[in-house]
Amino acid sequence: MKSFMPPKRTLMGPGPSDVHTRILEAMARPTLGHLDPAFQTMMEEIKEGLRALFGTSNALTFPVSAPGSAGMETCFVNLVEEGDTVVVVKNGVFGERMRENVVRAGGTAVMVDVEWGKAPDVDEVDRVLGEHPEAGILAFVHAETSTGVRADAEALCAVAKKHDCLTIMDAVTSVGGVPVEIDRWGVDAVYTGSQKCLSCTPGLSPVSFSEAALDRVRERTTPVASWFLDLSLVMAYWDGTGGRTYHHTAPVNPLYGLHEALVMIFEEGLEASYARHARMHKALAAGLESMGITFVVDAANRLPQLNAVRVPEGVDEASVRKHLLDAYDLEIGAGLGPLAGKIWRIGLMGTSARQENVELCITALADGLNRHQKNVDGKKALAAARAVLAA
Ligand SMILES: *Cc1c(COP(=O)(O)O)cnc(C)c1O
C-alpha cells in the first residue's frame, strides 16, 4: 500500500463542504488522552461555543461522536418510547428518516406529507396535531437538504407548544448558514452536523436538549435501546460537573477541528456568516438565472446554502456533473427520490460560500451546458454574479 493523496476538489454539493486549512491544521496537532485536563478544558469551550451557535442555555449541549445521522438517532432513541406517537413533517429525504427512527424506537409516526420542494404548511401541521391528541412530539427538518427548502421553525414550534408537544428539529444544514435560535423558538431537541455550514470534517453531530426533553428521558419506563447513544450514559462523560468517567474514547483530533470551526465562525460573527451565505446565494442565483436555469423552491422558502435548480431540458445531468468533476475538480450534487435526474443541488456551505466558488461554478456549468448545445453565455452570467457582489 501507498499513502492516499486525495485530488484537490472544490466541494459544492450537499455536504461535506470545503474544509478550511486552519481546521485541517488544528486536526493535525498531537493527540491527547481523552481524559487529559487540557482536553477537558477544550471540551468545555466546545460546549459553550455550541450553545452560542444554537442560541441556547441548555446544559446538555455536546457533539455526538458520529455523523449527523447519529445525532438524529440520539434524539429519537432517547425521546421516543414503545407506544409513543410522533407527528413527523416530511418534505424530503430526512423527514422519511425521522419516520424510520420513530418506528424503530417502537413508536407510531403520524406523517404530514408535503410535496418535495414546498415548505411545510403550518396550519396543516396544526390540524394534524389537533386530530392526534395522543402525540407527544412534533419532528421536522429545518433545512431540507434534498430540496433546498427552509421550514418556518418558529411557527412549527409554536403550534407544537399549543398542542403540548415537544419538538425535535433537524438543523444539520441550517446551523451556521441561516439563523437558528432554539431557546427563543422553543426547540426541545436539536441536532446538526460538522460538515455542512460549519465546514469541519464529517463525523461529528452537535446536539442540544431542553430541560423538558430531559424530563421526558428521565420519565422513561424502559431503558434506551441504544447503549452508545443513551443520554444518561453519555452525559457522564460530557457533563463536566460530577467528574468525567469513561464512556467511549472521544474522537480527539476531529474535536480539535470542531473547536477551530467554532473559533472561526465567532471570529467572523454569526450574523456576518448568515449575511455572507445570503450574498453568495444571490450572486449564484443571478448567474444561473442569466443562463436560463430556474430554482425548484420559491424565493421566500429558499435556503441560501442549498440551491436546488432544474436541469435544463435535454441535458443529461450526470454527464454534466462528471464533466465538472473531471475538468474543473468541482463537485455538485444530484437530485434524490422524485427529483433524481431532474435537479442539481449546489451547496454554498461554510467555507464553500465564497466568491471564488460561485464564479467557478458558473463558469463550469456554462461550459457543461454548452457541451449539450445550450448556447449559454458564461461571461454574461459571471458578470451578473459579480454585479450582485459589487453592489
Ligand atoms: C446531511 C444531513 C443529515 C445526515 O448527516 P450525516 O452526517 O450524513 O449523517 C441529516 N439531516 C440533514 C438535513 C442533512 O442534510
Image: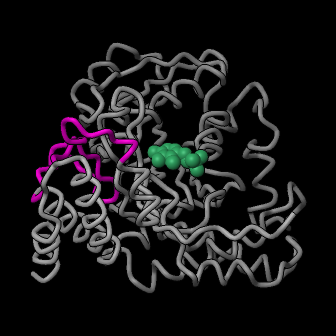
Q: Is residue 41 above or below residue 331?
A: below
Q: Is residue 386 above or below residue 236?
A: below
- Answer whether residue 310 is magenta in the image: yes
Q: Is residue 238 visible?
A: yes
Dividing the image into 4 quarters, which one contains the C terminus? Answer: bottom left
Residues 225 and 24: in front is 24
**Residue shown at 39% from the left, 28% from the top:** 90
Q: Is residue 183 visible?
A: no
Query: Which stretch is magenta?
Result: 290-319
Does residue 236 appear to the left or right of 216 in the view shown? right
Does residue 99 appear to the left or right of 316 in the view shown? right
Image position, residue 219 (x, y; %): 68, 32
Image position, residue 328 (x, y; %): 41, 66
**Residue shown at 26% from the left, 40% from the top:** 315
Tell how many labels.
0
- Answer whether residue 161 is magenta in the image: no
**Residue shown at 43% from the left, 24% from the top:** 87
**Residue shown at 57% from the left, 68% from the top:** 200
Dividing the image into 4 quarters, which one contains the N terminus? Answer: bottom right
Quarter of the view holding residue 140: top left
Residues 169 and 348: in front is 348
Image position, residue 120 (x, y; %): 27, 33
Quarter of the view holding residue 268: bottom left
Does residue 167 appear to the left or right of 117 in the view shown? right
